């Protein structure tokens, strides 16, 4: 990512006054599950709970093992298979409904499919199986090497049948005629029993997020859930004492390799969040913000900045420009891969 002359005095101040911790690289989904005390997963159950519908299940029963079964496009690139998720291309509601209807008619022996939105699908299995797979954000835009999927899962062979079925489906024939990418596979991940969604725990008294997984975790915890604020001022007006805010605007720009949008999005974060946070913490404006923890799951690892107590008063501490932080992290790679 080329940072160029992106100016971030607010973030630089926060970096200089915070205790910095770098740990093993994890996905955004895993980071959210960890924050709510669910490191073992069950993302599908929680994400379903966070969908806009009051009850996303179809049929209504919440029994059984659920998977995220998100529509994707697999293509060859430099002799490798690369996965593009539905954020990289368009799927309309009619296409999603037609494909879901056909999948349910053809693979009823496997389970029941449901589309919460055109981009987010679910599968309730008739019989529980062990299935380990990375979250979608960990594989989107990446080549499909063997370590990204569980080849031992009983669903692996069945998924090959699904891919052949989708390849010949009229929806994809029409998309091909229109020059659109085929919806030629599903990414199955986040296995978990629906009842697990009632066991989340967290320390925040309010959640501000648009991401359905985060919303579901908040609902399962029983805390107030509100849309993601546009700026710090809006958050402070909410009256929340220990809020958790999910600022995930940068994720699409990274997954779809859009550096210009990344720069603009980070500039917006600087103007609406980091600079105002610096003002609050350095001058104690209104004594509103006293402690701050920033968690960022990145390609460099899980990064965490924590400001508390007297750290914010150490005016002599200097932060690092974004480019220097990125260069330092890239120079010392971490062991391990996303989990």
Image: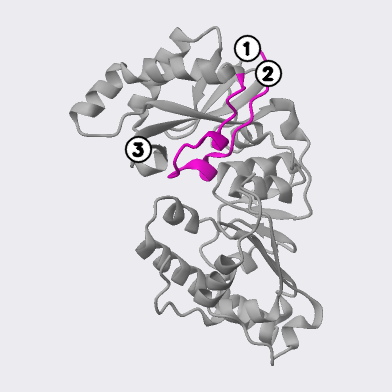
- Between 195 and 138, the residue placed more toward the observer is 138
Rounded to the nearest angstrom, the CA distance separating label 2 from label 1 is: 7 Å
Left or right side of 8 for 261: left
Label 2 residue SS: loop
Tell me if label 2 and label 1 are in contact, CB under 8 Å: yes
Q: Which residue is at a point 79% across and 54% down the rendered structure image?
A: 203
Q: Which residue is at a point 66% across and 12% down the rendered structure image?
A: 127
Rounded to the nearest angstrom, the CA distance separating label 3 from label 2 is: 39 Å
Q: What residue would you read off at disc 3?
A: 79
Q: Position of residue 84 (x, y in %)?
A: 40, 39
- Between 178 and 233, the residue placed more toward the observer is 178
- Residue 245 position by quadrant: bottom right
Secondary structure mostly seen in magenta is loop
- Between 180 and 324, the residue placed more toward the observer is 324
**Disc 3 vs disc 1: which is toward the camera?**
3
Residue lying furthest front in this view? 79
Residue 273 visible in image: no
At label 2, counting other C-alpha atoms closer than 10 Å, the crowd grade (few under 14, some 14-19, many 20 or more) is some
Left or right side of 200 for 109: left
Q: Which mark is residue 64?
A: 2
Q: What residue would you read off at disc 1?
A: 126
Q: Position of residue 218 (x, y in %)?
A: 69, 45
At label 3, counting other C-alpha atoms closer than 10 Å, the crowd grade (few under 14, some 14-19, many 20 or more) is few
Residue 145 lies within the magenta run: yes
Residue lying furthest bottom in this view? 316
Provide the residue span drawn in magenta. Answer: 126-153
Q: Is residue 270 above or below residue 1?
A: below
Quadrant including the C terminus: top right
In the rendered structure, which disc, 3 or 1, sits on the residue that comes first in sequence? 3
Q: Which residue is at a point 64% across and 58% down the rendered structure image?
A: 334
């Amino acid at each position: 990512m080329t940072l160029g002359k992106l100016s971030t005095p607010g973030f630089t101040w926060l970096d200089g006054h915070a205790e910095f911790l770098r740990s093993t690289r994890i996905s955004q989904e895993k980071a959210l599950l960890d924050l709510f005390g669910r490191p073992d997963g069950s993302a599908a159950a929680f994400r379903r709970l966070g969908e806009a519908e009051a009850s996303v299940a179809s049929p209504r029963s919440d029994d059984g093992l659920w998977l995220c079964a998100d529509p994707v496009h697999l293509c060859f690139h430099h002799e490798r298979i690369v996965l593009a998720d539905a954020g990289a291309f368009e799927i309309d509601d009619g296409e999603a409904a037609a494909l879901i209807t056909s999948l349910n008619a053809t693979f009823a022996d496997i389970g029941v499919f449901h589309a919460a939105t055109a981009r987010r699908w679910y599968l309730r299995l008739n019989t529980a199986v062990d299935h380990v797979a990375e979250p979608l954000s960990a594989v989107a835009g990446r080549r499909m090497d063997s370590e990204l999927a569980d080849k031992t899962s009983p669903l692996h062979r069945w998924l090959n049948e699904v891919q052949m079925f989708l390849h010949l489906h009229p929806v994809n024939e029409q998309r091909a005629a229109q020059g659109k990418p085929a919806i030629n596979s599903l990414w199955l991940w986040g296995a978990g029993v629906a009842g697990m969604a009632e066991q989340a725990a967290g320390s925040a008294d309010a959640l501000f997020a648009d991401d359905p997984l985060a919303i579901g975790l908040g609902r399962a915890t029983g805390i107030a859930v509100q849309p993601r604020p546009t700026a710090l001022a809006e958050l402070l007006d909410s009256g929340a004492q220990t809020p958790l805010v999910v600022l995930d605007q940068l994720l699409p720009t990274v997954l779809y390799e859009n550096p210009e949008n990344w720069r603009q999005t980070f500039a917006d974060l600087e103007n609406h969040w980091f600079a105002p946070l610096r003002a609050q913490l350095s001058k104690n404006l209104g004594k509103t913000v006293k402690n701050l923890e920033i968690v960022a799951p990145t390609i460099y690892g899980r990064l965490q900045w924590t400001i508390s107590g007297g750290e914010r008063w150490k005016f002599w501490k200097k932060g690092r420009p974004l480019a220097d932080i990125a260069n330092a992290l890239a120079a010392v790679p971490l062991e391990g891969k996303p989990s």
